[in-house]
Image (cartoon, rainbow, N blue to C red):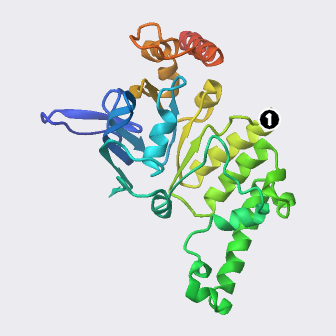
Amino acid sequence: MSSSAGANGAPVKSTGLHVGEPAPGVKKVDPIIVADGIKRQFGGLTAVDVEHLEIPRGAITALIGPNGAGKTTLFNLLTGFDKPNEGTWTFDGQSISGVPAFRVARKGQVRTFQLTKALGLLTVLDNMKLGAKGQSGESLARALFPWFWRKEEEAIEERALDLLARFKLDGKKDDYAASLSGGQRKLLEMARALMSEPTLVMLDEPMAGVNPALTQSLLDHILNLKKEGMTVLFVEHDMHMVRHIADWVVVMAEGRVVAEGDPHEVMANPAVIDAYLGSHHDQDLGEPDTDVVTAIKELAHDDADESKH
């Protein structure tokens, strides 16, 4: 445990990933993303209204919340797929406010989607090759002279095959991506994201639509990203998965961050349960996800039991 001086000169405790008591907008020891005053409105609806948010480097952070909480919209803003009405944010110390998605990806921040974006009429191997950045052959002038980029192309293919083997998709390398199952497409999208050797990987509901037989495989791959030095930020509704792999949890409701903290503590936070149940909110959050609410209650109960022993 370390300490630093606060605004009033008093020492501020640093515990693990954060500095001070865990609360919405809490400062992190080493943030990779710092966002301030991000607001996104659609007509009269405010989808995202985040005052301050920091994502810790080298950790797995889960972004959770009821349907319509603004999680995917925030993802779209941070990755350049959408523009906010106001607000600024940095990635790895550099401002990327308003930077288009392809430039954000080149800086080392890549994402996957809830609905996979594999190019169905290309083979699995060709999909992988598309993920590599800075390819000389993409230049019109150099494309006319294959000897300039042939060795680079061979190195890209070798890396693609290595990743496909790691994700157990090497046997599908010559198949069209459209022939893959939903879970296999999730694996392909994650593997393709790694082709760019990213610093931060953002996963939008990686378990959605995945056959239970592939769930553990996906979990292991996400954990491996952290072991290899990458930061992971993911949106997920499976609370058991969140508690199993997340180091930090950010909870959104009605576009705002309502809680942050260790997964075990967050699951027992009344504000989190209230956000899912919607019992104390003036605005209707829609029908709560029964499975999520039940899971949160079960996990909170499990944590309470564990603390007694």
* Residue 257 in view, yes or no: yes
Query: Identity of the amino acid at label 1?
Result: Asn
Circle 1 — which element?
loop
* Residue 30 in view, yes or no: no
Seen as rendered, the residue at the extreme top is 279
Residue at horizontal 15 percent and vertical 36 percent from the top = 7
**Quadrant (top left/top right/bottom left/bottom right) for the N terminus:** top left
Q: Nearer the viewer, residue 59 or 112?
A: 112
Using the rendered view, name the quadrant where residue 134 is placed. bottom right
Q: Nearer the viewer, residue 121 or 30?
A: 121
- Residue 305 placement (x, y as % from top left): 58, 10
Residue at horizontal 58 percent and vertical 64 percent from the top = 196
Residue 40 sits above or below residue 21 on the image? below
- Residue 278 placement (x, y as % from top left): 48, 12
Residue 210 sits above or below residue 277 on the image? below
Seen as rendered, the residue at the extreme left is 8
Residue at horizontal 64 percent and vertical 49 percent from the top = 224
**Quadrant (top left/top right/bottom left/bottom right) for the C terminus:** top right
Relative placement, left or right, of 20 versus 173 is: left
Relative placement, left or right, of 263 versus 113 is: left
Residue 34 sits above or below residue 96 on the image? above
Q: Nearer the viewer, residue 284 or 309?
A: 284
Residue at horizontal 71 percent and vertical 46 percent from the top = 186
Q: Nearer the viewer, residue 13 or 155?
A: 155
Relative placement, left or right, of 230 versus 180 is: left
- Residue 169 placement (x, y as % from top left): 81, 55
Q: Residues within 10 Å of mark 1 (few under 14, many from 20)?
A: few
Using the rendered view, name the quadrant where residue 28 is placed. top left
Seen as rendered, the residue at the extreme front is 43
For mark 1, what is the residue? Answer: 211
In this figure, what is the number of numbered marks? 1
